[in-house]
């Protein structure tokens, strides 16, 4: 999946602020932003960079199952911020199932779906 398909940090912020609904897309976008903010890499903002960081850490597809397995390897004392970020990502996956995404969807696919939703909204 090409990272160019991902919404940018600024567009995601604008989408969250201008979305008058309280639907699962907006909530998932908020949890995604929280996960990016919590990930312990200075100045990390772009969803595509966040995905790159996760892929480097996990070395597998970014499915919910693989993220849960990675979570188990982290120690609270040294990986607290990563644990927080992953907890937010669990919420993103949970909300994505409300959009009829396959439970085996990858985080990349979910972000592309968010991106498409907010790009459509921008033109409506």
Image (cartoon, rainbow, N blue to C red):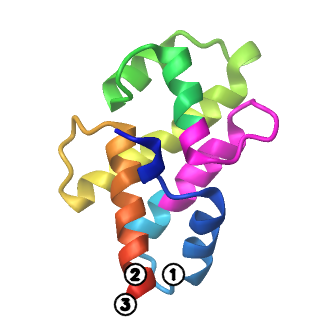
Report whether 17 appears left or right of 105: right
Report whether 22 appears left or right of 81: left
User: Can you identify the residue that label 3 sits on?
Assistant: 124
Residue 121: which disc?
2
Question: What is the C-alpha distance between the residues marked 1 and 2?
Answer: 9 Å
Q: Are marks 1 and 2 in contact (CB under 8 Å)?
A: yes
Q: Position of residue 24 (x, y in %)?
A: 38, 66
User: Can you identify the residue that label 1 sits on?
Assistant: 19
Label located before the other in sequence (1 or 2) = 1
Judging from the image, what secondary structure is the residue with disc 3 in?
A: loop
Residue drawn at (63%, 50%) of the image: 34
Residue, far bottom: 124
Is residue 83 covered in magenta? no
Judging from the image, what secondary structure is the residue with disc 2 in?
A: helix
Q: On the image, which quarter does residue 69 sit in?
A: top left
Question: What is the C-alpha distance between the residues marked 3 and 1?
Answer: 12 Å
Q: Are marks 2 and 3 in contact (CB under 8 Å)?
A: yes
Residue drawn at (33%, 30%) of the image: 63
Query: Where 35 falls versus 86 (above or below)?
Result: below
Q: Nearer the viewer, residue 96 or 42?
A: 42
Label located before the other in sequence (3 or 1) = 1
Report whether 47 appears left or right of 67: right
Q: Which residues are magenta?
A: 29-49
Q: Neighbour class for label 2 at 10 Å: few (<14), some, many (≥20)?
A: few
């Amino acid at each position: 999946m090409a990272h160019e398909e991902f919404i940018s940090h600024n567009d995601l912020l604008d989408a969250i602020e201008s979305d008058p609904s309280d639907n699962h897309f907006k909530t998932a976008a908020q949890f995604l932003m929280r996960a990016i903010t919590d990930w312990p890499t200075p100045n990390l903002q772009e969803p595509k960079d966040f995905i790159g960081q996760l892929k480097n850490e996990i070395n597998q597809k970014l499915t919910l199952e693989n993220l849960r397995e990675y979570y188990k390897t982290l120690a609270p004392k040294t990986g607290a911020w990563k644990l927080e970020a992953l907890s937010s990502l669990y919420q993103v996956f949970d909300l994505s199932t409300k959009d009829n995404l396959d439970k085996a969807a990858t985080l990349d696919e979910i972000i592309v779906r968010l991106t498409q939703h907010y790009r459509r909204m921008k033109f409506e």
